[in-house]
Amino acid sequence: MKPGAYVLISGTSSGIGAACARLLDQMGFRVFAGVRKTADGEALRQQTSQRLEPVLLDVTDEQSIRNTATHIAQVVGNTGLAGLVNNAGIAVASPIEFIPLDAWRRQLEVNVTGQLAVTQALLPLLRQARGRIVNIGSLGGFLASPFAGAYTASKFAMEGFTDTLRMELRPWGIEVALIVPGVIATPIWSTSLAAADKLLNQMPSKAVELYGTAMNTMRKKAYPTGGTSAEAVAKAIAHALTAQRPRTRYPVGLDAQLGILLTLLPDRWRDHIICSRQVGKALDMPPK
Ligand SMILES: NC(=O)c1ccc[n+]([C@@H]2O[C@H](COP(=O)([O-])OP(=O)(O)OC[C@H]3O[C@@H](n4cnc5c(N)ncnc54)[C@H](OP(=O)(O)O)[C@@H]3O)[C@@H](O)[C@H]2O)c1
């Protein structure tokens, strides 16, 4: 992919998406930066060149996706789209027994179905440019943890989605890569914690009775306060878009690399290690 080529990134208001938009812009690409609020696009543009163009894109809104695809088609003309970075995402935290179904659906809608809808809408333009697709997976895409069931379901799905897409698009030379970040220092953790508190308030008191201790322990032990920088993830995305032979998977951060080793353990050993690290003995306690 040459500088000056067009790239669309979803979810660029903060975190990994914003870091990726800034880096690709610095590298000379023409970035369409997906945001849901005009003000977020304007704020991002203050940090980039005038080449970057914010586009209003909600990955759960079909009309918004159509408008974005139509606009990009008009701007790029015969050049096509050289890259699509499916980055937008949310993290819903809740015990599976009590998660409201609309919260579960929303998690999958944003993190999986929305990525599919955007990919389908942009594939004709990607094919035109023999472009590349970069999906954002997660350490949670191969390692489950308590109270992250909806999120891990969405990221496990991204693993299968990405591998299938890579095989199906081989005839057109469209490379598809999966970025696999460990814990990254972005606002997703505080947003997810606030949303989890709101969800918990809507649940029956039985939810607190059964899972309250474990959830409180997890909040203290497992919610990260640091993490690898979003810029490190942006570098991996840039490699996936520009390397002559991109990798199919890019673990980012030591935790993502070491996490792969945990998948080699028998399931119950792995459960024990994850539970004792994240929720202490709380999940072993008999319900009151
Ligand atoms: N941070 C981590 O530790 C970590 C680890 C592994 C994977 N990831 C993945 O990395 C990606 C980016 O997350 P982040 O950590 O950078 O979090 P973030 O700072 O919270 O960014 C999430 C982005 O997604 C956007 N978004 C949310 N719902 C959307 C929708 N319906 N349509 C379009 N955009 C939407 C947000 O926009 P608004 O501001 O408008 O809500 C925001 O720009 C996600 O896919 C996440 O799962 C993160």
Image: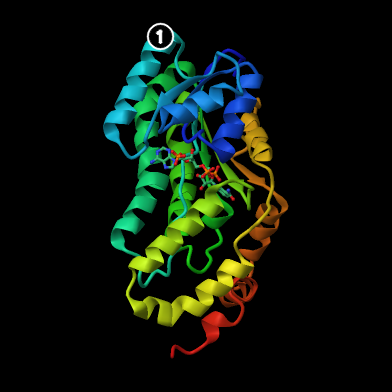
Report if residue 138 is visible in the image.
yes
Q: Which residue is mark 1?
A: 77
Give the farthest residue toward the right.
254
Percent x, y of residue 92: 44, 57
Tell me: 17 left or right of 277.
Answer: left
Quadrant of the rendered image containing residue 48:
top right
Lateral position of residue 253 relative to residue 200, left or right: right
**Residue closest to the far top:** 78
Question: Residue 251: horizontal and vertical position, in percent?
Answer: 65, 47
User: Could you tell me the amino acid type at mark 1?
Assistant: Gly
Q: x%, y% of residue 36?
A: 40, 33
Residue drawn at x 57%, y 28% is 21
Ligand 1 closer than 8 Å to label 1 CB: no
Q: Is residue 102 above or below residue 241?
A: below
Q: Residue at x 53, y 66 (%)?
A: 145
259 or 232: nearer the viewer: 232
- Residue 8 visible: no
Relative to residue 43, is residue 208 drawn left or right? left
Q: What residue is drawn where x is 42% and y is 27%?
A: 38
Q: Residue furthest left?
A: 63
Instruction: Note whether 215 is above or below 22 in the view shown.
Output: below
Residue 236 placement (x, y as % from top left): 65, 36
**Secondary structure of residue under mark 1:** helix
User: Residue 274, relative to residue 209: is it above or below?
Assistant: above
Residues packed near mark 1 inside 10 Å, few (<14), some (14 to 19) or many (20 plus): few
Quadrant (top left/top right/bottom left/bottom right) for the C terminus: bottom left
**Residue 162 in the figure: left or right of residue 234:** left
Image quadrant containing the N terminus: top right
**For the point 50% across and 34% down, which residue is it?**
13
| Closer to us: 262 or 192 | 192
